[in-house]
Image: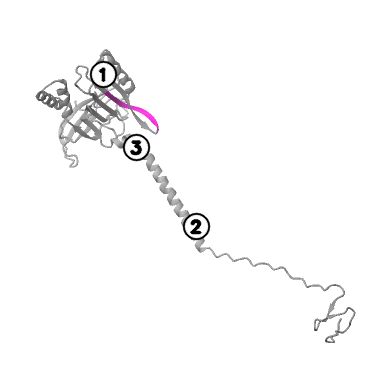
């Protein structure tokens, strides 16, 4: 079954079990990247001939329906069936079958899709440590179409590392994490593995990240740092970083509101200053002057102002009568 990462936006069906995150009518598109070269390099490093490496890689890619010319995959969920159960290594495991249509395109910009498979069958399995460990390959990691929403990623990574130790393999596994408002949540698994059978081969690495609905958001498989396959849901960056984007938008809006408020206040202040009447300077109050009183024993003529002796009835200068 080829890996098709999905994400659900439809209203949830109350009849579905909690580990099933997709809904009927969901339609999803994601970009694809395939390259046979790194896988051929691995086979040649292992000791196989160039011709064998090319032929084996062609068959391997065809088995997964990987095409280097394809730019995008598309899936439409037709039907989600009733829950069923199966026996796996002595345990009863619940799963939900579903039907989907599968399309691909070699020209994403033209939006020209080719019908590849109609009424294809898939299944979503609840988390079981044995089932999911067996599905997580040493080289490719977890190459799974849709997983349950109840996967314990930390436990899966620990189990895979224990398996590496049991077989004396050079490998490492870690739970992938996503940050939401400074809170971390597990969302997938990353692996590293290098074959111990030869010292000439390099390391395989894989990264599998899933949405909260349990569908693949991002998958990449590399050899010696070169990508063999990469799948990324359209809109994956926003899905992973929406809260950072929201925070930036809030800060930008707050900055704009603050700037506009400051401009309005400054303009109003200038307008008030422009129309206000000029201030009139206060007139200084001059205290009233009191008449100068003549010292005792001195008199002046009211007509000519000459000083006259006290007790004199007439001015000696002008002859005016002195009262």
- The residue most toward the bottom is 319
Q: Earlier in the sequence, mark 3 or mark 1?
A: 1
The residue wearing badge 3 is 242
Q: Main secondary structure of the magenta part?
A: strand
Residue 192: in magenta span: no
x%, y% of residue 321?
A: 86, 84
**Viewer-nearest of discs 3 and 1:** 1
Q: Can residue 18 be seen?
A: no
- Which residue is denoted by mark 1 in the rendering? 170
From the viewer's perspective, tell me whether residue 164 is left or right of residue 53: right
Residue 184 lies within the magenta run: yes
From the image, tell me which residue sits under label 2.
269
Image location of residue 165, percent across then percent down? 28, 15
**Residue 74 or 55: which is nearer the viewer?**
55
* Mark toward the start of the polypeptide (3 vs 2): 3
Q: Dot 2 surroundings within 10 Å: few (below 14), some, or many (20 or more)?
A: few
In this rendering, the answer to whether 30 lies above or below 95 is below
The foreground one among 252 and 303 is 303
């Amino acid at each position: 079954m080829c890996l098709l990462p999905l994400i659900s936006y439809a209203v949830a069906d109350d009849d579905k079990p909690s580990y099933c995150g997709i809904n009927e009518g969901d339609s999803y598109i994601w970009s694809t990247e395939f390259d046979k070269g790194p896988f051929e390099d691995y086979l040649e490093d292992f000791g196989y001939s160039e011709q064998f490496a090319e032929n084996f890689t062609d068959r391997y890619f065809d088995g997964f329906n990987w095409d280097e010319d394809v730019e995008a995959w598309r899936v439409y969920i037709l039907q989600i069936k009733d829950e069923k159960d199966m026996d796996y290594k002595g345990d009863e495991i619940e799963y939900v079958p579903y039907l989907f249509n599968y399309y691909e395109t070699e020209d994403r910009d033209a939006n020209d899709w080719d019908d590849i498979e109609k009424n294809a069958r898939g299944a979503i399995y609840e988390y079981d440590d044995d089932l999911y460990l067996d599905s997580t390959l040493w080289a490719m990691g977890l190459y799974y179409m849709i997983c349950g929403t109840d996967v314990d990623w930390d436990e899966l990574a620990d189990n895979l590392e224990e398996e590496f130790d049991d077989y004396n393999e050079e490998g490492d596994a870690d739970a992938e994490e996503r940050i939401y408002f400074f809170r971390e949540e597990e969302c997938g698994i990353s692996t590293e593995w290098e074959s111990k059978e030869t010292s000439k081969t390099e390391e395989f690495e894989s990264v599998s990240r899933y949405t909260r609905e349990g569908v693949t958001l991002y998958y990449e498989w590399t050899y010696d740092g070169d990508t063999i396959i990469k799948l990324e849901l359209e809109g994956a960056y926003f899905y992973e970083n929406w809260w950072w984007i929201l925070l930036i938008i809030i800060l930008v809006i707050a900055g704009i509101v603050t700037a506009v408020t400051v401009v309005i206040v400054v303009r109003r202040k200038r307008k008030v200053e422009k129309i206000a009447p000029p201030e009139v300077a206060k007139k200084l109050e001059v205290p009233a002057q009191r008449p100068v009183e003549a010292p005792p024993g001195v008199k002046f003529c009211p007509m000519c102002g000459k000083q006259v002796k006290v007790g004199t009835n007439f001015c000696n200068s002008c002859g005016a009568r002195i009262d």
